[in-house]
Image (tube, helix red, strand yellow):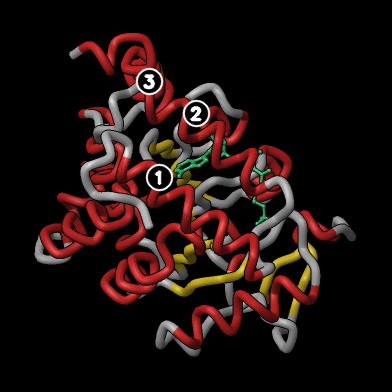
């Protein structure tokens, strides 16, 4: 039991979720290391959502609403930290959710399918029964995707994604949105929209934005997307790693 008065209460709660996911068997073995790296970046930015991250979230939500087949890709870490919030975002923007694991095993897929079911979501893609295809014919796990989900999607939200997978998705011509606390990661650099924020803050914020943007004209959303420069925004984001905590 973590006392609420602990100065690192929020951070310890997230660690606890990660530890429990590991004990339940759906976190990748290296999921804790990935979490630690994210935690370090979050500490540097003062554990607050920055202005450039908010800007990127507006663009991301606009792009997802404009898409024909938007998909939210989920892995062990994202599910451990934000399963309910991901389901809520998916419903609000009419996106599919797909299990997409870097370290894919049948057992982890089975456990994640059950997790989403237990949280009231039955339509998850990428399950053991799903029709899996290989992007651009690359016959390895990193290129596997559900036929009706990532394989045929135009825009994919890939939080906490490994660089290799992001690269394959990007090369296949898809619009890639990431949530990654590391602005220097290959995934952040390669994506069309990079949100440098903690997934636990970003996803609920995006759901709020969606409620607003869904009521706007299509042209307003197109303008939001077209006026965005991801490279510039990432540069601005990375300044917060140096100064964020001292603001
Ligand atoms: O569940 P699997 O098999 O798909 O594996 C998931 C991990 C995350 C282990 C796998 O994709 C991996 O190895 O990823 P990387 O290369 O460690 O990249 C994860 C990125 O997410 C890093 O840049 C971290 O800084 C970032 N990150 C970690 N925790 C968070 C985060 N970004 C946003 N919010 C977080 N809470």
Q: How far across and down, in percent of the image, does residue 140 sit?
A: 87, 58
**Picture quadrant of residue 164:** top right
The answer to whether the beta carbon of the residue marked 1 is less than 8 Å from any atom of ligand 1 is no
In front of the other: 125 or 216? 125
Q: How far across and down, in percent of the image, does residue 73 sit?
A: 54, 62
The answer to whether the beta carbon of the residue marked 2 is less than 8 Å from any atom of ligand 1 is yes
Between the residue at mark 1 and the residue at mark 2, the CA separation in whole angstroms equals 20 Å
Q: How far across and down, in percent of the image, does residue 208 sit?
A: 17, 58
Earlier-in-chain disc, 1 versus 2 = 1
Can you identify the residue that label 1 sits on?
Answer: 12
Quadrant where the N terminus sits is: bottom left
**Picture quadrant of residue 130:** bottom right
In front of the other: 14 or 172? 14
Q: Which residue is depicted at the point 29% across and 54% down?
A: 61
**Picture quadrant of residue 56:** top left
Q: Which residue is depicted at the point 32% across and 17% down?
A: 240
């Amino acid at each position: 039991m973590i006392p609420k008065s602990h100065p690192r209460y929020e951070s310890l709660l997230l660690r606890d979720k990660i530890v429990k996911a590991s004990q339940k068997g759906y976190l990748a073995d290296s999921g804790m290391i990935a979490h630690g790296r994210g935690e370090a970046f979050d500490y540097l930015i003062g554990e607050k959502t920055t202005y450039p991250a908010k800007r990127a979230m507006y663009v991301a939500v606009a792009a997802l609403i404009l898409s024909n087949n938007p998909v939210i890709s989920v892995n062990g870490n994202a599910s451990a930290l934000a399963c309910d919030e991901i389901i809520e975002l998916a419903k609000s923007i009419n996106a599919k959710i797909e299990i997409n694991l870097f370290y894919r095993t049948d057992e982890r897929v089975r456990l994640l399918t059950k997790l989403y079911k237990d949280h009231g979501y039955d339509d998850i893609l990428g399950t053991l029964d799903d029709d899996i295809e290989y992007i651009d014919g690359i016959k390895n796990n990193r290129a596997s995707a559900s036929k009706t989900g990532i394989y045929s999607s135009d825009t994919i939200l890939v939080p906490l994604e490994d660089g290799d997978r992001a690269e394959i998705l990007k090369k296949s011509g898809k619009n890639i949105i990431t949530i990654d606390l590391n602005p220097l990661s290959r995934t952040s650099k390669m994506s069309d929209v990079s949100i440098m924020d903690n997934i636990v803050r970003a996803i609920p914020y995006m759901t709020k934005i969606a409620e607003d943007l869904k009521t706007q004209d299509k042209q307003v959303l197109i303008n939001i997307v077209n006026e965005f420069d991801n490279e510039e925004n990432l540069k601005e984001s990375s300044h917060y790693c140096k100064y964020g905590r001292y603001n």
